[in-house]
Image (cartoon, helix red, strand yellow):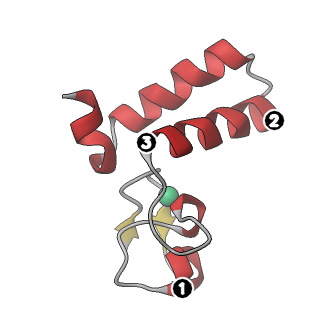
């Protein structure tokens, strides 16, 4: 089973992959509508919004948590080096 390189989500079924394409390295939550992978800033914004809405984080804490999560993921290695 593969893990999304951009958010760490386990991808089990084709439906979990971007565009249902199991050759992709990232999941449907990390894909843009055209199937390409979101940028660092897009993903950071998306994760921040997700944490605010679902976990009740305030904006600043959510940004920090989003960055901490992304730091561990291979897709964003270059953004932290
Ligand atoms: Zn993902």
Which quadrant of the figure has residue 16? Answer: bottom right
Which quadrant of the figure has residue 62? Answer: top right
9 vs 15, left or right, is left
Mark 2 neighbour density, 10 Å: few (under 14) some (14–19) many (20 or more): few
Q: Residue at x 42, y 66 (%)?
A: 26
**Eyeballing the image, is 26 above or below 9?**
below
Marks 2/1 in contact by CB < 8 Å: the verdict is no
**Eyeballing the image, is 81 above or below 23?**
above
Instruction: Calculate the distance from the C-alpha at mark 2 to the C-alpha at mark 3.
Output: 20 Å
**Eyeballing the image, is 79 above or below 34?**
above
Whichever of callouts 3 and 1 sits on the residue coming sooner in the sequence is 1
Q: Residue at x 41, y 52 (%)?
A: 6
Residue designated by label 1: 20
69 vs 50, left or right, is left
Residue designated by label 3: 40
What is the number of the mark on residue 68? none
Element class at badge 2: helix
* Residue at the left extreme of this rendering: 81
What is the number of the mark on residue 53? 2
């Amino acid at each position: 089973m593969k893990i999304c390189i951009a958010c760490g989500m386990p991808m089990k079924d084709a439906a979990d992959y971007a565009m249902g394409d199991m050759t992709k390295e990232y999941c449907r939550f990390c894909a843009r509508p055209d199937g390409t992978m979101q940028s660092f800033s897009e993903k950071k914004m998306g994760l921040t919004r997700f944490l605010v809405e679902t976990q009740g984080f305030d904006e600043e804490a959510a940004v920090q948590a989003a960055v901490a999560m992304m730091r561990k993921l291979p897709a964003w290695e270059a953004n932290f080096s």
